[in-house]
Amino acid sequence: MSDMRVPAEQKRLTDDPFDAKIEVATVGSIEAIRTSHGALRAEATPDLVRNHGQENAVGIFFRQAGIAKTGQSDRTSVQRPGDLMVLDCRPAAQEYSSGSQMLTLHIPRERLESVLGPARLYSGLTIGADLGSTALATGFLTELMRVSDSLTPAVADRMSAIGIDLIAASIAERLAQEVSRPLHETVTVQRAKTYVEANLGDPDFGPPELAAAVGVSLRRLQEMFHERGRHVSDYIWERRLLRAGHQLSKIEHGHLQIGAVAYSCGFSSQAHFSRRFKAHHGMTPSEFRQAALEVAR
């Protein structure tokens, strides 16, 4: 596990014969580790956290069998089969019952925090299997890992993005259950950002549709974004442009026409896309792709 950049010291909790299995896969931007093992304690010490260099990733844990107890900072929680949990790259301790099975995903920190805020706000929080969004995320990602070997790089990249969107939606729904009134608007904005990520490819999607999706008036949604220094429409276009830049920088997407990238990111015309892309990135889509591919080679 240490060789796989998992910063944890592990110790058996019983004298029973110990048995374990580890499976590893990479799907798009997701690094996945499936483990099954006997009872043990795993502790991410400060030294291990510093030495493993996982600052740019966040750990997502899907409990498939057994029970886990987790502690990070001032939060302790219990996870049962079907539950989901996030762990930030900070010291933590976990205890697993015998017969434990778990799917651990390492996903880019920026990808999650761009829609939900700092990971410390929800790290160590159990996102229960009773939530519909958790069941959807668990089912989708479990099946995605099963068929990962049969996916082309382009499809794997897109499917991993959908999986991360489902994880973000689960976390947002869980946070909405317990936040105090002063934090309600923050959660609404986080839910809105999650919904934006899932609908960037729809050219008809905009602020009115977003307001209806999160259950507030367009005026109130605009006010909430303004209070956080953003305009709703600017945020949507920014996310579209960032996704387009991500696609153009991928070698496996090199066969895609610029127009196809534009339409997949919600632009109704290539001219509009090129104009906005250059204003945001400082170069045309073609120039951006060429520069990115030269660096990749």
Image (spheres, grey):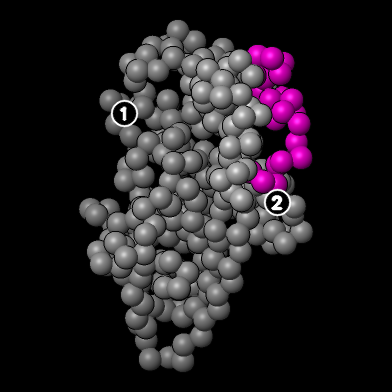
Question: Residue 99: x and y, percent?
Answer: 50, 77
Q: Residue furthest top?
A: 219
Residue 14 is one of the magenta-drawn residues: no
Query: Pointer 2: what residue?
Result: 153
Using residue 124 as the reference point, say whether residue 258 is left or right of it: right
x 58%, y 22%: residue: 277
x 56%, y 53%: residue: 30
Image height of 280 relative to 156, above or below? above
Compute the Cα span from label 1 to label 2.
39 Å
Tag 2: amino acid: Pro
Pick whichever, 34 or 150, lies toward us: 150
Image height of 283 relative to 176, above or below? above
Tag 1: amino acid: Leu
Question: Residue 241: x and y, percent?
Answer: 57, 26
Question: Which element is circle 1 on?
Answer: helix
Q: Is residue 86 visible?
A: no
Question: Residue 182: x and y, percent?
Answer: 28, 25
x 42%, y 67%: residue: 6
